[in-house]
Image (cartoon, rainbow, N blue to C red):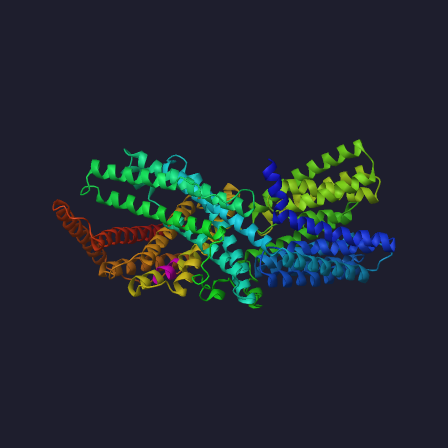
Amino acid sequence: MVNNLIRYFKSIHFIKAFLVALAMAIPVLISIYFFDRLDIGFSIALGAILCAPSDVPGSFKHKFYGILVSIILSFAITFLIGYFSSYFFVMVPLLTILVFSVSYISVFGFRASLISLVGLLSLVLAFAHQNAETSILEHALFIALGGVWFLFLTMLTQLVLPSVQVDFLFVELIEKTAEFIKIRGKLLVETDDRTNLLEENFKLQTEINELHETIREVILEKRLSAGFSNRTRRQQLFFSKIMQIYELAISNTIDYDKLDASFKNHPEIIDEFKLLILEVSKRLNHISKVILKEEKLSFNNNFKVLLKKIENHIEIYKVNMGLSQYREEIIFLLNYNTYQEKQISNLNDMFRILDGYSKNDKIRAIKDAEQFITPQDYDIKRLKANFSFKSPIFRHSLRLTLTMLIGFIIGNVIEMQQPYWILLTVVVIMRPSYGLTKERTIHRVVGTLIGAVIGVGIVFLTQNPIVYAIIAASSLVIGFSLVKNNYRNAAAFITVYVIFMYALINPNILTVIKFRVFDTLIGSLLAFVGNYFFWPAWESKNIKESFSHALESFLEFFKEIDTLYHVKGEASTAYKLARKEAFLQVGNLNAAYQRLIQEPKSKQENSAIIYDLMTIINTYLSSLSALGMYIRTNETGKAPKQFEIYVKHILSNLEIAIAILNDKEEYNITLEPQELALATKNYDDYFQNLAQERDIEIEKGLPISKEMRMKLHETQLVSEQVRWLFNLSESLVKKVSKI
């Protein structure tokens, strides 16, 4: 409990929340002390809090420009709404244009969506200005000043505490990677609960991919702009090791049905592998605690003991079952053991980097680093391309606009204390996806009710303004720090903050609480109903596009693997970019699937087929990665003709599946089944010839040569992977035709 509390206070979420509170408190105190006025300080504080959403992890440049655009947007919208707020018939068309336009800029990506949120919050809070001492223009200028003040504090914090953001991102990534690996270990033995575990992995892959993108932006762009310092070297090396651990975990997926059948009578071997994987996960968590200075770096582990046990079990299995009869199973165990050794090697490298070890002469800059940073595409053409009902953002913008207009009319028709609270609730709850809107609606309502109950309880205990001020300030920091990880509790603390801020101005606090709850309920109901009935973008209608993008990335990745198998040597930049794109597109697909399963059952069309496709595609990525990893990290012979035949058939199936998903009826692809059957026979014959040759060597008492070991392992692994990839591609064609 104490450790969790310490971690909370050291987290980037708390630091950012404290920064927001500081950015708000200082102008208010200065305004009261020097000018004996609250309104100036309040406007500046409002400008600071409005820009807070655009302060998200990323490079210094992107943060700076993101907050700067937020300042300009909040100033312009505050002035426009404030100037025309008393003209109802002007406000309706103005509100329509502004809400749609501001929400529509979300088409430019995640950071743009947060700037859009700033604009929408500015629009809503502009209705709150009712002070006669400050003109609308002055109020808008003070808001801009507050944004500049917040920008200064944010940039100063990043300069003074440069490692806080990166350390936090690394900790989050390491812990999620540890959890991902832990689930991989559980999947080996949990025969009854694999579906739930696989769905957990889908969700984790999405979160891990998002963190990869953010960290790439931070450390690679820093390298491009600030030079290649020793710290940057170590960060890049550390990141590459985490990436390798994650890629190895993805690459070494298993046909679990085959695993269960092969080792049903020898579960002790699989149990030992599970223990080893859990130890890797445990040591990763230890690294995250070392970064946070919660634990001291310790090299103590059970890896040697666990690896020795596995080697002994494999030897016993080999003796008891017979090498010639169970050669494929034994090669699988040996390959899987080699994979674990590589994971441990990467993990030990991470420990050495943390321990201050870094060979600067061997740590080189990432080749073509700028190509690995996903570009921020702000091309104006995207606005035109998304101006269609096919675009979920276009639909969301229309939906939000209509819902806001309804809320605005209700707020003006019904006599309320703060009618803009309805609009504020709609803005913070309503999201493009139904599932997230529903989740936030529930959390918002429950959190508001909890906050209201706490507020009433405190009111009955004390009417001391100093106590109210302390509670308000504390609730603001805690509420903002919890927004990302626990929205319900965040809503409760923010409600307490709002209640006691108004209590300092309005003595009739119980009325404030009543209207706060009432307005939140109306806004939540509007957001939920609007998302269900106003041009809903059900994920089952859009997920085909995500499937298509994933398969297109597989096509390019497989072509690069094929090239690497022929040319040998170090993996090219094109190979690495194709691999990165495949991981990202599968992550996007997993996110789309998560949204789908949160929607009403009646709207989840073809859910069983989609789940099967999800499983196939994630398995496909694992198999592709395994093939690429083996070719990249092992000495291989000349690519045989049968490999090329399999590649041709697999790529053809992928092209057919993509054509079906894109509703193209003509494929113009003709293949010869006999060709594939011959390739399969050639692979089998070649492996059997090698096996017989090795059996003869064993009879003669000859040890296995390096060349023979390489040929056996390469033939068994490569042939198994391409067969599996072909079977999966066949399944893909059958499944996609059903959706």
Q: Which residues are magenta?
A: 554-559
Figure quadrant of residue 553: bottom left
Q: Is residue 555 magenta?
A: yes
- Horizontal placement of 435 versus 41: left or right? left
**Which residue is painted at 67% across and 63% down in the image?**
68
Q: Nearer the viewer, residue 67 or 515?
A: 67
Residue 306 appears in the picture as rendered: yes
Q: Is residue 267 above or below residue 129?
A: above
**Which residue is painted at 15% across and 52% down in the image?**
689
The percent position of residue 149, horizontal first and vertical second, equals 73, 59
- Horizontal placement of 182 versus 164: left or right? left
Q: Nearer the viewer, residue 121 or 210?
A: 210
Q: Is residue 616 magenta?
A: no
Q: Main secondary structure of the magenta part?
A: helix
- Horizontal placement of 109 versus 695: left or right? right
Figure quadrant of residue 674: bottom left
